Image: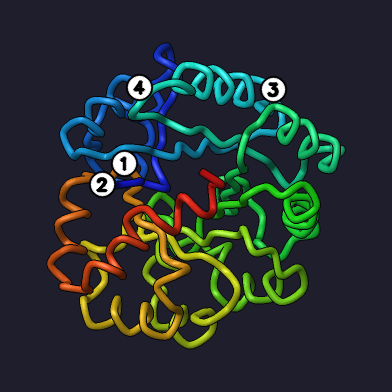
Amino acid sequence: MLIDFHTHVFPDKIAKSTIDALASRAHNLPYTDGTVQGMVDAMNRSNADICVTLPVLTKITQFDSITKFACLVNEQFKNSEKKLISFAGMHPHCDDIDGKMAYIKSLGIKGVKIHPDYQGTYIDDDGYFEIVKCAKKYDLIVVTHAGVDDGYAGEPVRCPPERVLKLIEEIDHDKFVLAHYGGHKQWQEVYEILSGKNVYFDTAYTVNEISEELFKKILNKHGEDKILFATDCPWQDISNNYQKIKSYNLGKDIEDKIFYKNALKLLGI
């Protein structure tokens, strides 16, 4: 079984324009067209069973439309053998964060995505603390972009390890996920500051940049029970990332946890 815990899809009518804009900003070429069908095709090529899709609110006014799209995706795949599971998005400047998180829970959505760079706010902002507190209250997963975002090169990193540590230590939510192996392009700091803390790391957009030695060093310190296979598809290829981790020869027990068992436990499946 294979679960990709970090992917992105967009409604058909905006998929091309959104993918084109993001690709231009980050100087990256996508592996899918950004549509739901494009992701399904990528899953079929890679034998992935489940992909978790993570929408981002770049404006607070997008809450209703993004939540609606998440529900449509989840309804479409609820009885499928291979499925997409969509989270909702939250923004730290939303009003009534508690009410919105309760609403997300009532819809059966399993979690939310936040992105400090896209949302122009540091991870230790009060709004993010409130989101994670409410996630703990309502038993929801929170996934945050962490570390450098290539689309914001040269700008301050809004979710570096030292800032996210404050949130982890104050709230201690056991369904909190740091994307990009704890902090994209800040992996030495991740090893020193965050490894071993009560937080998950996903492997999205990591394995083609990090050294095998440092990947294993973080894995050994953090523990295989808190690592989730992820790619950031359409920005990375699922099969390529899977084969890269397989090449590390971690052993079947550790691979199974990373590739699907930890995700099943976190998702409650």
Q: Are marks 1 and 2 in contact (CB under 8 Å)?
A: yes
* Mark 3 burial class by Cα count in 10 Å: few <14, some 14-19, many 20+: few
The answer to which image quadrant residue 169 occupies is bottom right
Give the residue at mark 2.
236
Asked where in the image residue 162 lies, by quadrant, the reply is bottom right
> Which residue is nearer to you in this view: 171 or 49?
49
Q: Which label sits on residue 35? A: 4
Q: Image height check: is 171 above or below 12?
A: below
Foreground pick, 101 / 93: 101
Tell which circle, 1 or 4, labels the residue nearer the N-terminal end: 4
Q: Amino acid at mark 3?
A: Asp
Q: Gap in Å between the C-alphas at discs 2 and 3?
A: 28 Å
Query: CB atoms at circles 1 and 4 under 8 Å apart?
Result: no
Looking at the image, residue 217 sits to the left or right of residue 237; the answer is right
Q: In the rendered image, is residue 153 in sight?
A: no
Dot 3: what SS?
helix
- Expressed as whole percent of the image width and height from the top left, the position of residue 132 reads 72, 56
